[in-house]
Amino acid sequence: MNLLSDTGRAGRRTAVWLACGLSAAAAVTGIVVAPVDGLQGPAQRLMYLHVPAAWVAYAAFTVVLLAGGAYLVGGDLRWDRFARSAAEIGVVLTAAAIGTGALWGQLVWGTWWAWDPRLVTTALLLLAYAGYLALRRLLAERVGGPDGADHRVARPAAYAGIAGFLLVPVVHFSVVWWRSLHQPATVLAPERPPIDPRMGAALLLAVAAATAWAFCVLVHRVVVLERRLAARPAADRTPVGAG
């Protein structure tokens, strides 16, 4: 689909409305329907922000992985633009996960930070993809080509984005592999801890809402990059450094 076409614009509007609806449902379920945790009290409701931020960050970095691989296989620079946009989303959401986790830790553990395997590996993940974005900027400035339309930027960035994904399973399973203050993984753990169905419903709705918003932002960022490239002089639109 051409994201700049009328059909593409209509699809983006539909996605925004869906994201709004899911957000409203998640807010009502998380605040009104889901019970307060018996041990952590109201602080537990931060889960409905913290967990979706972390999970959708994983999804964003998965897009970086897949889009980078697709670019390396086919050489289509549009995949590189998706990888860049997804990395931006992932970095923001990872920072949000660390921030909400720090607040949650202060309320429950009495400290903003602990040298916990989950916290340390998440910080490393943030640094890895912030480094990925910094590498793209540095390469674009060095070669003098636009980020998103230059193979001399896209190719090394694709390798860096794929390598960075190796940290994602380490982050997720860190609470299983090492002793940790962090609560065990609720999903994708060898033995899932019990969760109240109403809390589970609120969490799933929050993850769905965050995913929908991330999709909207991803498409918007790609559209912005496409428009910037389309606005460049015709002589400068040819992809640079192919081969």
Image (cartoon, rainbow, N blue to C red):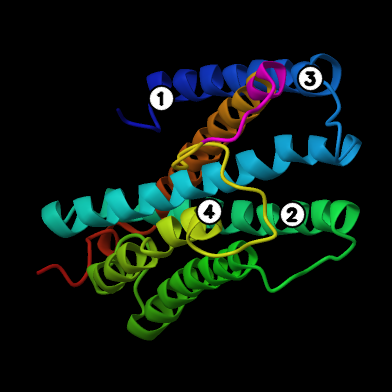
Binning the other alpha carbons within 10 Å of mark 4 as few (below 14), some (14 to 19) or many (20 upward) gives: many
Q: Looking at the image, can residue 156 be seen?
A: yes
User: Residue at point 46% right, 38% down?
Assistant: 219
Quadrant of res 23: top right
Disc marking residue 34: 3
The CA distance from mark 2 to mark 4 is: 16 Å
Residue 102, image x, y percentages: 78, 59
Binning the other alpha carbons within 10 Å of mark 3 as few (below 14), some (14 to 19) or many (20 upward) gives: some
Quarter in which the C terminus is drawn: bottom left
Residue type pointed to by label 2: Gly
Quadrant of res 105: bottom right
* Left or right, residue 30 beside residue 167: right
Residue 68, image x, y percentages: 28, 57
* Numbered label tally: 4
Mark 3 vs mark 1: give the one in front. Answer: 3
Highlighted magenta segment, given as a residue range: 192-200
Label 2 or label 4, whichever comes before in sequence order? 4
Residue type pointed to by label 4: Gly
The CA distance from mark 4 to mark 3 is: 28 Å
Residue 83, image x, y percentages: 37, 54
**Label 4 sits on residue:** 90
The CA distance from mark 2 to mark 3 is: 20 Å
**Label 1 sits on residue:** 8
**Measured along the vertical axis of the image, is residue 223 above or below residue 11?**
below
Label 3 or label 1, whichever comes before in sequence order? 1
